[in-house]
Image (cartoon, grey):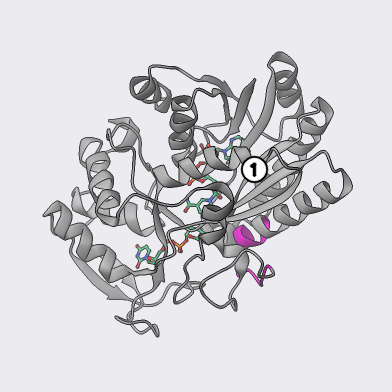
Amino acid sequence: MAVLVTGGAGYIGTHTVVQLIEQGEKVIVLDNLCNSSRDVFSRIEKICGVLPTFIEGDIRNRECLDKIFSASSIDSVIHFAGLKAVGESSQIPLDYYQNNVCGTLILCEAMAAAGVKKLIFSSSATVYGEDAPVPYEENMPRGKTSNPYGASKAMVEQVLTDLCASDPEWSVALLRYFNPIGAHPTGLIGEDPKGIPNNLMPFISQVAVGKRKELSIFGDDYPTEDGTCERDYLHVMDLADGHVSALSSLDENGVHIYNLGTGNGLSVLEMVKTFMRITGVDVPYTFADRREGDLPAFWADASKAEKELGWRATRTLDDMMEDTWRWQSNNPNGYEG
Ligand code: NAD
Ligand code: UFG
C-alpha cells in the first residue's frame, strides 16, 4: 500500500517524503510544480536511495486523481498542496479559495469514490485567530482569521470535520503547524522560495549568503520582552516526523487535531542573533513598521501530540540554524544551483 503525498515537491512535503521513505513507506507524489522544482526528486534519491513515484498534475484535476487511485493501491493521503503566501492571499483571494478549498473538495471526492478515507491535512496555527490566548490548545474554538489564506485553512478544517461526521469510515488528522524552519541535515533539500521571501528564516539566510542587502524587522514596539514578535519555530524534520507519527492516528476513525510546535516562543531579534552566533555570519538589519496582520506572540501547547502520538520536537534551535545555513550556503540559488 502507498501513501499519496499531494504537494510533495514543496518545502515541508520533500522532508516528509524523505522521512516516510526512511520508515519503509511507498510514496507517490502529486504536485503541479507551481511553487517547486522537479530537481527535488534526484536530491531525495541521493538521501534515501529511493526515487519516489512523481506525477505532475493538479489536485483540482479529477480525472488525474481518478487515474492515480485506480492505478495504485493507496491507503492514505497526506495533503500539502496549496497556496501559502499570506499577503498574496489578500490580493488574489479567489485563487486561494480555488486552490486550497476547491482543491481539497475535489481531492476528497476522488478519495471517497476510490474508497480511500484516511487523510492528513496541513492546517496552521493561524486558525486560532486573532483573539486566542497563548499557548494555543487544540480544544479552543477556531477564531477570526485575518486573511483569505487563514480563512481557507479554517474552511477546510470545517469541511473535513463535517465529512467525518457524515461518514464514520473517514479518519482525518488536522495538523496545525506553527513556524517550520531548517532543512535536511545533508543540505540537499530545503526551503526555496520564489522571489522575495515572505518568511523570516529564508530572508535571514538570503541576507547572510549575500542575495539581499539587509533584513527589515517588522515592528519593535510589540508588548513582548524585546518589542519584536514571538513565534514557535520548529525544525522541518521534526514536523516531517510529526506526519509519520500522525499516520498511526488514522487507525481510529473521526477527526484528530494536533498542534505541531515546540511549545516555546522566540522573538525575531533572538532568531537573528542566534543565526549570527551559530554561523559566524553577519546579518545587517533595520527596524521597519509593523507588518499588517502580524500577531504579537503565539506558541503551541504541544502536549496533546506527545501524549497521543508519542511525538515531540527534539531538534534544537542551534540545529535549525546550522541546517538552514548548510542548505543556503551550499545552494545559494536554491534548486537552480
Ligand atoms: P510549498 O509551497 O513549498 O509546497 C506546496 C506544494 O504544493 C508546492 O510544491 C506546489 O507546487 C504544490 N501545489 C500547490 N497547488 C497545487 C495544486 N493545485 N495541485 C498540485 N500541487 C499544488 O509550501 P510548504 O511550506 O511546503 O507548505 C505545505 C502546506 O503546509 C501548505 O498547505 C501550507 O499552507 C501549509 N502550511 C505551511 C506553513 C509554513 O510555514 N510553511 C505553515 C502552516 C501551514
Ligand atoms: N518578519 C520580519 N521580517 C521579515 C519576515 C518576517 O521581521 O522579512 C517577522 C514577522 O513580522 C513575524 C515573524 O518574523 O513577526 C515571523 O514571520 P513569518 O512570515 O516567518 O511567519 P508568520 O508567523 O507570519 O506565518 C507563518 C506562516 C503562515 C502560518 C503562520 C502560523 O507563513 O502560513 O506561520 O502558523 F499561518
Q: Is residue 241 visible?
A: yes
Q: Is residue 303 above or below residue 33?
A: below
Of the pair 148 and 115, the residue shown nearer to us = 115
Foreground pick, 61 / 91? 61
- In the image, is residue 149 part of the stretch drawn in magenta? yes
> Which x, y percent locates residue 37?
44, 30
Residue at 40 percent across and 54 percent down: it is 234
Which image quadrant for residue 332?
Answer: top left
Could you say where residue 170 lies in the image, as x and y percent from the top left?
79, 40
In the image: residue 282, left or right of residue 181: left
- In the image, what residue type sits under mark 1? Ser
Q: Residue at x 34, y 76 (%)?
A: 228
- In the picture, which quadrant includes the C terminus? top left
Instruction: Residue 16: give x, y in percent of width and height.
Output: 48, 36
Badge 1: how crowded within 10 Å, few (<14), some, or many (20+)?
many
Q: Is residue 145 left or right of residue 184?
A: right
Q: Is residue 11 above or below residue 318?
A: above
Q: Which residues are magenta?
A: 142-152
Q: Tell me if I can see residue 194 in this picture.
A: no
Q: Is residue 33 left or right of residue 180?
A: right
Q: Kindly identify the residue that appears in the image at 34 percent across and 47 percent down.
A: 182
* Whole-percent x, y for residue 30 in the image: 59, 28
The residue tagged 1 is: 249
Residue situated furthest left in the rendering: 280
Judged from the image, the secondary structure of the residue bearing numbered disc 1 is helix
